[in-house]
Amino acid sequence: MQALRLNADERAHLFFLARQQPPPARAMEPETVSPALQLFLDHQGLSPAFVTGRRWDVVAWNEAARVVFGDYEQMSAHERNSVWRMFTSPTYRQFLVDWEGHARRLLAQFRAMCGRYPGDPWLTELIQDLMIASPEFRAWWPDHEVLSASEDHKIFKHPQGGSLVFELVTFQVSDAPGLTVTVYIPLDEADTPAKVSQLLSS
């Protein structure tokens, strides 16, 4: 194993692939958010917050997330998928400062996640569609980099709000381990709290 010179994330990913365990039955079930979890999102105020499922599709969000990241209610299932949106949305590409850096990190995390659900037909279809839709995804997918954690500092260029700077917190829901909660805490840098407040009021 040391001869491969793998880091901790890459070793974990290799073990997932080697075990080739089938996904649990619940991995194929529709994902739902409890009323209590939705209430938690709604009480985050100026902090955009959303819940992603095991396939990285956004399944719940609060109003701050809607005004900062877009109206998820009006998006298709593909558009609500974090990886699809990252690699196919021209608007989101302009929205992110250092799009390539973010995209490569997200892809490394996505690659690690895919190893946990071998044979998932939805993921297989998503990857095939992305190979067609995105030249960058097609070029980078064969790489072997995997990551288990996301960066905790993000800067966005919002079309109405301008520069927005957030600290990122993510955690899994204990009674629904397939769900991940992401909260973007607005920093004083670039007057982000006031800008998010203005977006909410307008």
Image (cartoon, rainbow, N blue to C red):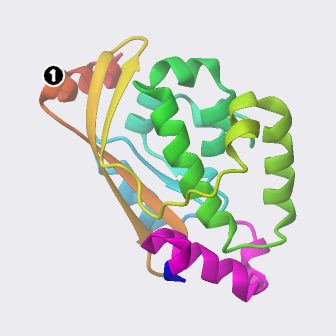
Q: Is residue 12 rendered magenta in the image?
A: yes
Residue 66 appears in the rendering: no
Which residue occupies the foreground of this view, 17 or 129? 17
Residue 123: name its quadrant: bottom right
Q: Tell me which residue sits at (75%, 30%) in the image.
A: 134
Magenta portion: prevailing SS class:
helix
Q: Secondary structure at mark 1?
A: helix
In the picture of the structure, the residue carrying the numbered disc 1 is 191
Q: Horizontal and vertical percent for residue 169?
A: 31, 55
Q: Horizontal and vertical percent for residue 56?
A: 61, 54
Point out the residue furthest to the front here.
Answer: 3
Residue 200: name its quadrant: top left
Which residue occupies the foreground of this view, 199 or 157? 157
Name above or below for residue 103 compared with residue 169.
above
Q: Horizontal and vertical percent for residue 63?
A: 42, 37
Q: Horizontal and vertical percent for residue 3?
A: 53, 78
Residue 157: name its quadrant: top left
- Neighbour class for label 1 at 10 Å: few (<14), some, many (≥20)? few
Residue span colored magenta: 3-31
Q: Is residue 30 rendered magenta in the image?
A: yes
Name above or below for residue 18 compared with residue 57.
below
Mark 1 residue type: Asp
Residue 164 appears in the rendering: yes
